[in-house]
Amino acid sequence: MTAQILDGKATAGDIKAELRERVAALRERGITPGLGTLLVGDDPGSQWYVAGKHRDCAEVGIESLREDLPADATQDEIEAAVRRLNDDPACTGFIVQLPLPKGIDTHRVLELVDPGKDADGLHPTNLGRLVLRVNEEITSPLPCTPRGIVELLARHDVDLAGKEVVVLGRGVTVGRPIGLLLTRRAVNATVTLTHTGTRDLESLVRRADVVVAAAGVQGIVRADWVKPGAVLIDVGVSRETDPETGRSRVVGDIDPAAREVAAWYSPNPGGVGPMTRAMLLANVVETAERLAG
Ligand SMILES: Nc1nc2c(c(=O)[nH]1)N[C@@H](CN(C=O)c1ccc(C(=O)N[C@@H](CCC(=O)O)C(=O)O)cc1)CN2
């Protein structure tokens, strides 16, 4: 069996086309959605992601604003930038690009974001809604990568009800919230959240119907661990130098040979990354639609 591809790039393209129309409708009503980004430091990966967010906004008609601070910015300076974005009427939603430099209290910064402008769904109020609203529709923003994974599967008619899902990684942007999303009544999966303290990861992966790998450890999921017919979602980001071009490239957590036994495979790059970007735009548009009543 060779897996069918969960093509995040193409799916994100479809979503962006839908969002472009919704933005045009908002603009006709005199409402202009505006995404703000707060970037601290000069990490090339983060700079690339933020630049991509601004390009995406331009593509669908969302205005965008930037707050860029140097790597040695203090906690107070970062918090002042958050307050500026909270207070700026042109900014209908914003994100704080993660990770923040060492020594900065990330929780304090995220808690300062106005929950009504939280385009990343990472404010405790919005994460709390995800915890509490197990049976209801959630109308507040959801974290972009987990939302992107659920949307990618839904748009390929992959049903997760009753399935055993193993998640690798307990980070705040992927592992923790994906567990909460997938166990909601609307999805009804059973989730095992694994981490560096997990014993015998291999046997958990071997019995999983779905693997969501967000550990950031290249090839941690071996091809011979994967159950035939499983669904594989690779979110891990490690970098290696391409021996042919000498350029840096992204490699995932799942051995790509596993696609020979899986039913569905979300590649990396080209899977969840583009969906993360599309879901950020969706959060911004929905926030603006809520503001518009
Ligand atoms: N505030 C946030 N910070 C971070 C988040 C987040 O959701 N909110 N997620 C990641 C970074 N990220 C967005 O910010 C992101 C990661 C990857 C991609 C992407 O499209 N990747 C491409 C490959 C890119 C490459 O070759 O380097 C792909 O998967 O095809 C977009 C956004 C951490 N920080």
Image: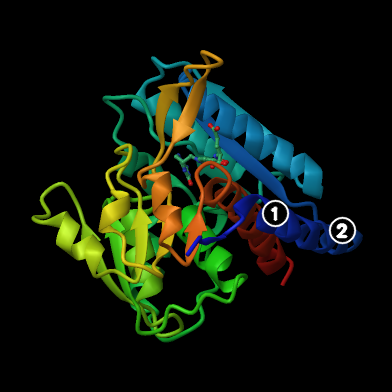
**Numbered tag placed on residue 99 in the rendering:** none
Instruction: Report the residue at 41% width, 86% height from top.
Output: 135
Does the residue tagged 2 have its C-beta within 8 Å of any atom of ligand 1? Answer: no
Residue type marked 1: Ala
Q: Position of residue 52 (x, y in %)?
A: 65, 35
Viewer-nearest residue: 179 or 118? 179
Kindly identify which residue carries mark 1. 10
> Quick one: quadrant of the C terminus?
bottom right
Classify residue 35 by image quadrant. top right
Q: Is residue 121 visible?
A: no
Q: Residue furthest front?
A: 1
Q: Is residue 150 above or below residue 161?
A: above
In the rendered image, the residue lying farthest to the right is 28
| Residue 149 point in image, percent of width and height | 50, 61
The residue tagged 2 is 24
Measured from the top left, where is residue 56 in percent x and y? 71, 42
Q: Secondary structure at mark 2?
A: helix
For residue 225, side relative to residue 81 (left or right): left
Query: Residue, x 38% and y 83% (percent of image)?
Result: 188
Measured as percent of width and height from the top left, residue 125 is found at 39, 62
- How has the structure been colored for display? rainbow
Does the residue at mark 2 contact the one at mark 1 (Cβ under 8 Å)?
A: no
Query: Marks 2/1: CA distance?
Result: 22 Å
Q: Quadrant of residue 199?
A: bottom left
Disc 2 vs disc 1: which is toward the camera? 1
Whichever of labels 2 and 1 marks the residue nearer the N terminus, that label is 1
Question: Under tag 1, what secondary structure?
Answer: helix
Give amino acid for label 2.
Ala
In this orientation, which residue lies closer to the viewer: 37 or 162? 162
Q: Residues within 10 Å of mark 1 (few under 14, many from 20)?
A: some
- Front residue of 251/79: it is 251
Would you say 44 lies left or right of 257 here? right
